[in-house]
Image: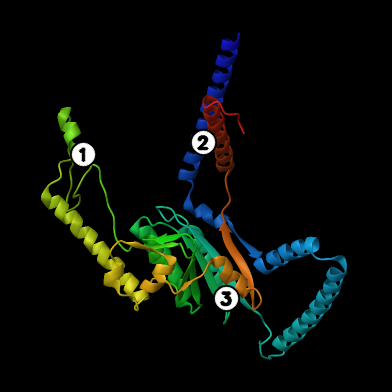
Amino acid sequence: MEYIYEFGLFLGQAIVLVAAFLIVVTGLVSIGQRNKAELHEGHIEIRNLNEKYKQIGESIEHVVADPETLKAKRKATKKQDKQEAKAARKASKRDQDGGADSAQRKRLYVLNFDGDIRASATDNLREEITAVLNQSTEGDEVLVKVESPGGLVHGYGLAASQLRRIRDAHVPLTIAVDKVAASGGYMMACVADRIIAAPFAVLGSIGVLAQVPNFHRLLKKHDIDFELFTAGEYKRTVTMFGENTEKDREKFNQDLEETHDLFKDFVSENRPQLDIASVATGEVWYGTKAVERGLVDDVQTSDAFIQAQLKERDVFDVRFVHKKTWQEKLGMAAESSLERAFLKIWQRGQGRPPV
């Protein structure tokens, strides 16, 4: 009976896994087929970071401060809020009368870019930059937190061009790298007026990489012919299945060198103070060493930068969020369930209790 029970349990888990797999596949197909125009059905979400950190501080203070001190501070804060509100009303009246705009607090807009190999976050970045530039006034600044190990040249080239829109609008741009901005990630970062990085953030990798597996000998061993038809001498150089010649490899390397030259020229244009010959070797450096090389201006985390701005500016986190279809939501839920099911099966096989 115990064997039948275990077999039934295994069969039930297998059915659940197969069903979850089919749901995930359906969700992924739906995502892949979604028209990019649907991005415009999304919306901008804005969070006031001043209020966020104020609430966090008040929560901590409520626990650690003694009641009398807390009561006195609340009274002083309430009085200060009234004074600030009164000053704001006066400033608003001066604006309506054509007076100076000296009382208006400047703003810092915080954007996030979490890059993959295709730089797919560029679609959201485009919308966020458009929204910010439509609202920015003189004295406002933008902080973009970039995290990416790089990827496709054309994808990151477009992402860098989107950031260039901020500078072209004469809005000061700071790029913060807390973990990694290498290759295409650094291509984006170098556009900024100022780059800051955490001490152990990874930067650099100003180089170009391409690798292609070749199965020609395997196909030949099994008497399988591979035929490739092209129009144009260099329509295709190295291939995965055909026989690559030295001429093919030479042309492929030439294309890589040309792309590398374009990369170096782009970095030099945006950071002319760099000794490009010494940093465009494909190497990477940690934040502190990157400062010495000129790749970064200061060692500082994005959190420290934002915290330093809270007293003088209104700080807003800006994100573009597109609407998810029910297939996507179902696929994400099924994917999570699938991961948990695999974890439980693995733990049972290891003799560990499920979590």
Instruction: Judge from the rendering whether residue 199 lies leftward or rightward of residue 321; answer left or right.
Output: left
Residue 146: x percent and y percent? 48, 62
The image position of residue 279, as x and y in percent, is 31, 68
Q: Closest to the observer: 275 or 299?
A: 299
Under mark 1, the amino acid is Phe
Residue topped by disc 2: 24
Q: Residues within 10 Å of mark 2 (few under 14, many from 20)?
A: many
Residue 73 left/right relative to 347: right
Q: Is label 1 in contact with label 3 (beta carbons under 8 Å)?
A: no
Q: Which residue is mark 1?
A: 241
Rendered position, 146 above or below 228: below
- Quarter placement of the C terminus: top right
Please, which colouring scheme is shown?
rainbow
State whether residue 201 is above or below residue 307.
Answer: above
Disc 1 from disc 2: Cα separation: 31 Å
Which residue is the site of mark 3? 136
Whole-number angstrom distance, CA of label 2 to CA of label 3: 41 Å
In the rendered structure, which disc, 1 or 3, sits on the residue that comes first in sequence? Answer: 3
User: Which of the marked residues, 1 or 2, is nearer the chain's N terminus?
Assistant: 2
Contact check, label 2 and label 3, Cβ < 8 Å: no
Question: Rounded to the nearest whole Å, what is the CA distance between mark 1 and mark 3?
Answer: 53 Å
- Compare marks 2 and 3 and give the one earlier in the sequence: 2
Residue 102 coordinates in the image, percent (x, y): 66, 87
> Could you say which quadrant of the image residue 219 lies in?
top left
- Residue visible at 57% across and 76% down? 136
In front here: 214 or 101?
214
Residue situated in front as seen by the camera: 180 or 266: 180
* Amino acid type, mark 3: Ser
| 10 Å crowding of disc 3: few (<14), some (14-19), many (20+) | some
Residue 158 visible in this rendered orientation of the protein: no
Mark 2: which secondary structure?
A: helix
Name of the residue lying farthest toward the top = 1
